[in-house]
Amino acid sequence: MSAIITAFSYCSYYNKDIIFCVLKACLGLLLPSRRKDLRGEVVLITGGGRGIGRHLGKEFAKHGAKKLILWGRTERCLMETCEEISLTTGAECHYFLCDVANREEVYKQAKVVREKVGDVTILVNNAAVVHGKSLMASDDDALMKTQHINTLGQFWTTKAFLPRMLELCHGHVVCINSILSLSSIPGAIDYCTSKASSLAFMESLTLGLLDCPGVGCTTVLPFHTNTDMFQGMRVRFPQLFPPLNPELVALRTVDAVRTNTPFIYLPWTMHALVILKSFLPQAALEEIQRFSGCYTCMDTFKGRT
C-alpha cells in the first residue's frame, strides 16, 4: 500500500512539472523569447565552405560571434568563404582542412584549434554527403563514407569539444539534420539511414545534458534545401512544397541557438508529417509518397557527393 501511495505522489509531482512545461511552451508561441547574446562566442562549423555551412558562418558573424572556424575537405571553398565573412562582417574567421570521418584527424585538428584560436563554445555539426542511389546500386565504400561523415563524424567532433564546454559550463552543440531522418525516401538510403542515426544521437545527447548548466543542444530538421548537394531532386508539386533557401535555414538555426530551442522543423508544416506518421497505416503513407512525388524524387538526382 505504501508503495502505491509513493508512486502516486511521484506521479502527482511530475504531472505538475509536465503541465507547467506545456503551458510555458504555449506561452512561448505567443510572446517573444529571450535571445542570448552571441558576442564572445567561438563558433566551429563543419562543412563550412559551402551550402548551408557557408550561410551559417555569415549568420553567426552577423550576430556578433567573436571568432568563426570553418572545417571542410575543400580548401578553395573554405578560403573563399572565410575571406567573404571577414570582408563583409569584419569577424575573425579561420579555416582548417579536416575530414570529420577521420577520427584521428578530428582529434588532431581540435587540438590545433584550441592552441591557435581558443576554446570552441558553439559546435555546428553540418558536414554531410549523399550517395543518392538505391541499396543494390550503391558501392559499399560510398555507403560507408556517408555513415562515417554524417553520423560518426558527430561522435568525434562532439567528443573533441564537449568536455571543455562542460568544464566552462558554457556551450552549445548544433546538428543540421534532415526531415528525411523521420520520413525516408527511395534512392537515398545511405543519407536517410545516416540522418536517422544522427537524430538518435542528438536526442540522447540532449537528454544527457539536461542537468549540465550552461550547455545546450539544437537539432534542425529542414525539408529539401536548395543546395548543390541535392541538385536535380524533384517533388511533384514544387509550388506546394518549394525547396528551402539555405539562407533561411541558417537564419532559423542561429535563432534557435539564441533561444536555446532543442528541436526545430523547417518549414513548420513538417510537424504535420510527424503527426500523420503516428497514426496513419503504412499503406496510406505509401500512397501519400506516391502522390506527392517523394517516391520518384531522386530519379533525377545529380547532386554533389
Image (cartoon, grey):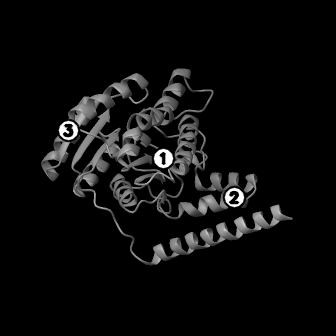
Residue on which disc 3 sits: 80
Residue on which disc 1 sits: 177
Residue under the image location 22 percent in, 56 percent down: 64
Q: Residue furthest right?
A: 1
Query: Residue type at mark 1?
Result: Asn
The quadrant the C terminus occupies is: top left
Alpha carbon distance from label 2 to label 3: 44 Å
Foreground mark, 1 or 3? 1
Decide which of 283, 120 is in the foreground and name it. Answer: 120
Decide which of 167, 269 is in the foreground and name it. Answer: 167
Query: Residue type at mark 3?
Result: Glu
Q: Secondary structure at mark 1?
A: loop
- N-term-proximal mark, 1 vs 2: 1
For the question of whether residue 88 can be seen, the reply is yes
- N-term-proximal mark, 1 vs 3: 3
Whole-percent x and y of residue 161? 38, 38
**Label 1 packing within 10 angstroms: few (<14), some (14-19), many (20+):** many
CB of mark 1 within 8 Å of CB of mark 2?
no
Decide which of 106, 4 is in the foreground and name it. Answer: 4
Residue under the image location 28 percent in, 54 percent down: 59
Q: 260 above or below 230?
A: below
Residue on which disc 2 sits: 278
Alpha carbon distance from label 1 to label 3: 25 Å
